[in-house]
Image (tube, rainbow, N blue to C red):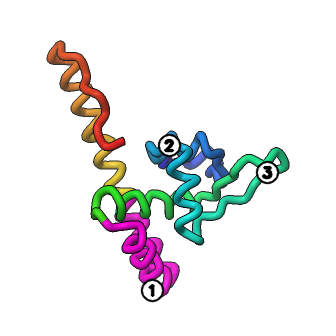
Amino acid sequence: MPRASATEPVQEFFSIGDVCTMTELKPHVLRYWESQFKFLSPAKNRSGNRVYQRREVELILLVKHLLYTEKYTIEGARKKVEEHRRGGAEALRGATRVALDRETLKSLERELEAVVQLLAGDEPRARAGR
C-alpha cells in the first residue's frame, strides 16, 4: 500500500478499483472473499459502490498472503485471521504488517526482474502470481 509523505494526508477510503490495483486482485475475487470472510464487509456509498477502509485493505492483504503464499484453504485462512483477532489489535496489526511487508517485497522483486529483462533487451515475461 502506498505510504503518504509527512505533508500528504493519509487516504482512509478506497474504491474497489483502488483496492484491486493495490492488492493485484480482480474485483470478482474481492467480492467472493466478502462472502467467505465476515470481517470483509465494505460499506457502500450512495451510488452503491464499495468503499473500503484502510483496515479492510490490510485484512485483504493478510488473506491474500494466507491463501496465496502460506497456501491455506479458505477455511484455514478464516481460522488463522480469527486467531489473530482473538490475540487483540496488536496481534492482528503485526500479522497484517508481516503480510504487507512480504507482498511489498514480492512486488519489488517482480518489478526489478522486469527492469533487468528490459536492460538485457528481453521482453518482460507476463507477471506471475495473479
Q: Position of residue 62 (x, y in %)?
A: 42, 63
Q: CA distance from mark 3 to mark 1?
A: 32 Å
Disc 2 and disc 3 in contact, CB within 8 angstroms: no
Task: Name which residue type carries label 2.
Answer: Lys
Residue at 55 percent across and 44 percent down: it is 27
Which contiguous range is marked in magenta? 72-99
Task: Name which residue type carries label 1.
Answer: Gly
Comparing labels 3 and 1, the label whose residue is closer to the camera: 3
Q: Position of residue 9 (x, y in %)?
A: 65, 48
In the picture shown, does residue 57 fall above or below 9?
Answer: below
Precedes in sequence: disc 3 or disc 1: 3
Would you say the magenta stretch is mainly helix, strand or loop? helix
88 left or right, relative to 119: right
Classed neighbour count for the residue bearing mark 1: other residues with Cα under 10 Å, few (<14), some (14–19), many (≥20): few
Towards the viewer: 7 or 122: 122
Q: Which residue is mark 1?
A: 87
Comparing labels 2 and 3, the label whose residue is closer to the camera: 2
Disc 1 and disc 2 in contact, CB within 8 angstroms: no
Tag 3, which secondary structure? Answer: loop
Furthest-right residue in this view = 46
For residue 87, what is the image quadrant?
bottom left
Disc 3 and disc 1 in contact, CB within 8 angstroms: no
Towards the viewer: 63 or 14: 63
Q: Which residue is mark 2?
A: 26
Q: Which residue is mark 3?
A: 45
Residue at 53 percent across and 66 percent down: it is 36
Precedes in sequence: disc 1 or disc 2: 2
Tag 2, which secondary structure? Answer: loop
For residue 118, what is the image quadrant?
top left
